[in-house]
Structures are given as C-alpha cells and as structure tokens.
Image: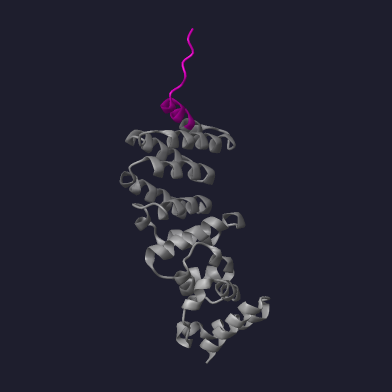
Amino acid sequence: MTNQTPSAKSLLEHSLQVVTHGPSAVERPVAAHVAQILLEAMREPADELAATEVMNAIGHRLEDAAVVLHLLFALRKTSELEKLIRGVEQLAARAHREKFSDSLRHIVLCMIETPGWRDAVREEWVRDAISLAPGLAQRSTWRICVAWVRLHDSVPDWICEIVEHDPELFDCCFPDSWRWRLHSAAPTSHGWRFLARRREQGKQMLTPTTFGAQLDQAIETLEVAITEEKGETRRVVLAQRLSEIAG
C-alpha cells in the first residue's frame, strides 16, 4: 500500500476544520498557525473559495484573538484584497459590538496597515481597540496610532490623551515633524527630553503660538524636563526652548 502525502489544500482544509469545530481551546490557535503557514507558502493567491473558508473560520472564532491574528494577517498577503473588504468590515463591526477588544485590535491593525483596507477603518473601532489594550499589546497600540495619524494627517484628541498617559509613544517610528505636531498638541516632559536628543530638533523654530491653548502645559512640562535632564548640553537646549516659548 502506497502512502500518499496530503496536499497543501487538504491540510489547509483540515486545519480550518479544527479551528472551526475543534473542541480544544489549545488546539484551535495551533491549527490557525498551521493554516497561516500553509497560506503564506502558497505560490498562487488563495482562491475565492479558500478565502471564504478562512473568513468563515475567523467569524466562528472571533472571540479567539490568536486565531484572528494568524488567519487574517496571512489572508491579507495571499488574497485579492478588494474582494475581502466587506467581510473584514463585518468582522470588525461585530468584534466592536461584542466587545472582543483583543480581536478587534488585531483586525484594526491589519486593516490600517493594508492598502485597500485602511480607508474602511472607523474611528470608533480604533478607539475601542486601544482603550483597553493591556501592557503586552502596547506595541500594536502604538502602530495603530502612528498609522491613524499618517492616514488622516491630523492628531485627534484621543491620541493626545494616549501620549499624555504613555509618553514613550514618542519613541515609535514617527518622523520628527510628526513628533513636533504630537508634542505641540500634548506636551510632556518625556517629549521635551526626547526631542532635545534629536539632531533635527534644532530645525524646529518655536514661539508661544506653537502650542496654542497648550502653552501653559508646554511651559510646565518643559520646566520639569530641565530639572530631570542630566546632560548639560541637552539642558542648555531645553533652556533655550523655554526662552523661546515663555518670552
């Protein structure tokens, strides 16, 4: 009797069956990971039937963030994105409605970093996805914030609140011009000290009007930054900034 090696397609189908119907909460994410590997190894994009089966599997296990992470991120690399956008929107709306915050965060991150999907992301999904993010999800929260600011070319109030509570957002991949825009909207002592370490910071000319209604907060946090800063050169830079905005 000759043993036949299962095809990738049959292995994918079996993995999705385990994800959808498997009784074990431990096995389902493993099966989703196997499906992800198979999808990403395909030389051709997943056909419409396979993509539909993957979407259905995600829908069945929407409460399982690990399943969502493995399957959706693989699917965006292997499928015709425009054919999936409606289904992805429905997954996001349902995750938002049913308070699956971890899954929603994965969906929002996947959408906002995927051309063809990012314009469909709703602000209410983003705010909900990051509002209850635990410490381990900090990096994905930052990525969502960065992508949202770049997409809309503006800094909304709720991102200012995140910067105030989590100043290390400045250490993400924003270019300096965007860091200044964030900092002027939500000045923090961490932001002042971070910008004082950047070579490019000297190119940014400051006046009291730079901070608008946040001027008092800018002065207060800058004074704190000068006290906290240990480097003599950077303290000089910060003191110069204080003279510029305080007059």
Could you tell me residue 119's position as x and y percent?
35, 57
Left or right position of 175 against 23: left
Is residue 161 positioned above or below 18 on the image?
Answer: below
Residue sitting at x 31%, y 44%: 83
Left or right position of 25 against 159? right
Q: Residue furthest left?
A: 82
Question: Which percent across, then down, holds residue 204?
Answer: 47, 78
* Residue 33 position (above or below residue 190): above
Residue found 52% across the figure and 34% down from its top:
31
Query: How is colour applied across the structure in the image?
Result: one colour
Residue at horizontal 40 percent and vertical 43 percent from the top: 77
Q: What's the residue at 59%, 85% (across, down)?
A: 239
In the shown orientation, is residue 93 left or right of residue 24?
left
Q: Toward the viewer: 35 or 63?
A: 35
Q: In x, y percent, where is residue 242?
A: 56, 86
Asked whether residue 27 is drawn in magenta, I would say no
Taking depth in this image into account, of 17 and 165 the one nearest to the observer is: 165
In magenta, the rendered stretch is: 1-15
Is any atom of residue 14 visible in this view? yes
